[in-house]
Amino acid sequence: MSATPSSHRSPEPGTRAEPGNIGLSEPNVSGREWEYVRECLDTGWVSSAGGFVDRFEGEFAARVGTRFAVAMASGTAALHIALLVSGVAADEEVVLPALTFIAPANTVRYVGAWPVFLDVEPNHWQLDPDRLADFLRFDCSARDGRLVNRRTGRRVRAVLPVDILGHPCDLDAIRDLAAHYDLLVIEDATESLGALYRGRPVGSESHVACFSFNGNKIITTGGGGMLVTNDEQVARRARYLATQAKDDPVEYVHRAIGYNYRLTNVQAAMGCAQIARLDEFVALKRATARRYAEGFADQPAITAYQEAAWATATFWLSTVLIDATGPHGGSRGLLRTLAAQGIQARPLWEPLHRSAAHHGADIRPCPVAEQVHREALSLPCSTGITLEQQDRVIAATRRALRTAG
Ligand SMILES: *Cc1c(COP(=O)(O)O)cnc(C)c1O
């Protein structure tokens, strides 16, 4: 891998920063990756079958505490298959938080269904169970045993909470509501592998949950994902759909439309090396977030991310809120000031109720998502970041808060 990816000043998160620069969240592949990948190359087991795929699935399921894990080519592929195996159909609706990376909402459209975006809660920025309760109680009604969104006339089928930034959503509250209204819970845990909800691993308790091993996630296989479930039928169906829906692999007989979504053995080999280091990576991410919180404790313009009493977060990203007023020019002013010094920071995603890509979805006001979007900034937090680099980020940020951006 080249250490100098291109002439870009600010590389994609999950790729390597130029020497001297501090990247946002870079891969850490200093474990047994080389040894395991070489084993694939030496034996010729490089494709979508092989010992590392089975081993990675087994170790992953054990780690998350589910009966089954099905390795996928990406987190997005896992989410697409999760919706298919859950039976979410065209013109049905799936409830999502407005503040998330766009992939889960896109996969709702892949199956012809529609997202409904609800606001997040102000403390941890996850799907707000109160907004969900209000939506289900006041904006939907039961017709012929189905829950229908009165505004669109579409059947509401599932809730898709997203555990953003390494912190779990309030899953019990969301699951209770889903159970009461007979909705499925499909959990996007792609950003929160290793986090705990009330002491239980994130992703262990939903009908289906999905993870990602993209380059900037807490563990990486270069690209990859995982679908986990406790339901054997769901796991079998997911594996079938992700492997071209082969009913007879010799005669090439297919009874369904399948996908080529499986993880390769080479990627799974990386996954085995990476997951062995998950606890270590979580500890490093948490330490970085704590160090920033301490470094900014006396700064009224900065609010550190708060972990819920019921959560053990991974702090996959070290995200803070920056007061919008002041000479530094708010989160975007600070972003530019840091970028000029080779420090990669990043805002959160455009709230999806405002996304042109999701024109046609049922849109409701999401003032909390909008405020977090204005003020949030993620700071460098690669697991390989040094104390000296953290000090540079803290000093540059403190300097920027005193001077005009
Ligand atoms: C990264 C991510 C995904 C998609 O994962 P890929 O492996 O990149 O396809 C989905 N949802 C969320 C919230 C993510 O952060």
Image (cartoon, rainbow, N blue to C red):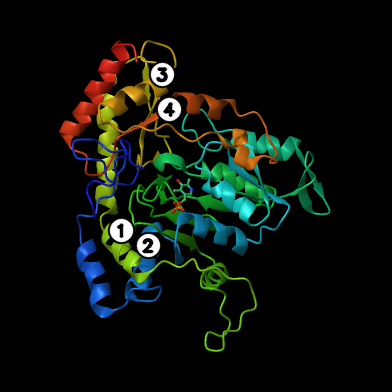
Locate the C terminus and report the quarter of the image it occupies: top left
- SS under mark 3: helix
Amino acid type of disc 4?
Ala
Mark 2 lies on residue: 60
Label 4 and label 1: CA atoms lie apart by 29 Å
Q: Say left or right for 148 vs 185.
A: right
| Circle nearer the viewer, 3 or 4 | 3
Can you tell which mark lies on residue 158? none
Measuring from the top left, give residue 403's x and y in whole percent.
30, 11
Residue 56 visible from this viewpoint = yes
- Amino acid type indicated by mark 3: Gly
Q: Residue at x 78, y 38 (%)?
A: 151
Question: Residue at label 1?
Answer: 275
Location of mark 4 (residue): 376
The residue where tag 3 is placed is 330
The residue under the point 60% across, 64% down is: 85
Q: Secondary structure at mark 2?
A: helix
Does the residue at mark 3 contact the one at mark 4 (Cβ under 8 Å)?
Answer: no
Question: Is the distance from the Cβ of mark 3 to the nearest ligand 1 atom less than 8 Å?
Answer: no
Q: Is residue 57 left or right of residue 153?
A: left
The residue positioned 43% from the left and 12% from the top of the image is: 325
Q: Are marks 2 and 1 in contact (CB under 8 Å)?
A: yes
Which part of the image, by quadrant, shows the N terminus?
bottom left
Judge the density around disc 3: few (<14), some (14-19), many (≥20) Cα neighbours within 10 Å: many
Image quadrant where residue 328 sits: top left
- Badge 4: few (under 14), some or many (20 or more) residues near its Cα, within 10 Å? many
Of 162 and 339, nearer the camera is 339
